[in-house]
Amino acid sequence: MDSLAVDLNLLLLDPRKGRPLVDNARCDFATSAAVLRQLEEQGRISVKARGRFARTWTIRVTDMTPIGDPVTDTALRNLGGRPKTVREAMFRYGQLWRQTAYAVLAERGVIQYERRKYFRLTLSDRWKVTDINEHERLRTALSDAVLNGGNPDTHWTALIALLYQVNVVPVLFPEKRKEAKRRAADIAHYDWASEALRKALEVRRRAMVVLTPHMFSVSTTRKPRPETT
């Protein structure tokens, strides 16, 4: 069985630069949404909408049987115990699950970790795509589903919906940006994990708007000098 999180992270990698096409936070959130979507599809968790207009979702593990995919099996262990909200899982485990997906790709020989150093200082990390054929296979299948009128299954439907929410679809199809984005938007509209990802990204965006002015503001007021007699 194909891993949704593994395929997603390979599509999110720029094969030329060896870095994600979007920032790390969006990659983490998208990975966690993919993991939860696959766990729900495989009957390992239940997802229940809460609040008016489904403002949030609660997840509960219903079956601890491993699926056989290192990413989802790691997630099952993380999610055991008390029920958690989807947003909590995204913020708490997204980075761990993404690193696990990278480890799976590296073990398969699809990507290779590289670290650039200069005088013992780490300048940048990158994941070089070593199996370009596997990357192109996913890109071709994605193109068939988005642009060529294909009938994608649940796996590809979820991939397209999540890629749309992190705004990668126009980057993957620069020559047909509007057509690809319109088709992806239609698919994302019916996917709960995609909607949960959108709301989590919105929460993060609002938090950054609130925090940024306080982080970079410099006070220009001076303390009054004591009067001399």
Image: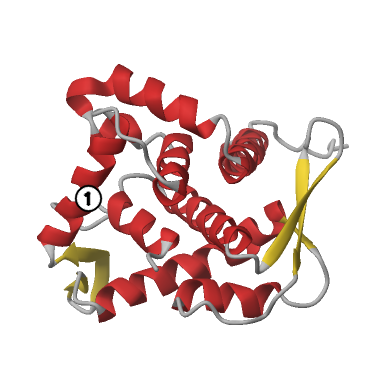
| Residue 22, placed above or below residue 112 | above
Under circle 1, the secondary element is loop
Q: Is residue 17 visible?
A: no
In the picture of the structure, the residue carrying the numbered disc 1 is 14
Q: Residue at x 61, y 37 (%)?
A: 195
| Residue 77, placed above or below residue 85 | below
Front residue (pair 122, 88)? 88
Q: Residue at x 24, y 37 (%)?
A: 144
Front residue (pair 117, 1)? 1
- Quarter in which the C terminus is drawn: top right
Image spot of residue 89 (x, y percent) = 66, 61
Extreme top residue here? 178
- As drawn, is 185 to the left or to the right of 176? right
Colouring: secondary structure
Q: Quadrant of residue 39?
A: bottom right
- Quarter in which the N terminus is drawn: bottom left
Image spot of residue 203 (x, y percent) = 66, 39
Q: Quadrant of residue 228?
A: top right
Image spot of residue 93 (x, y percent) = 59, 66
Q: Is residue 4 visible?
A: yes
Q: Label 1 sits on what residue type?
A: Asp
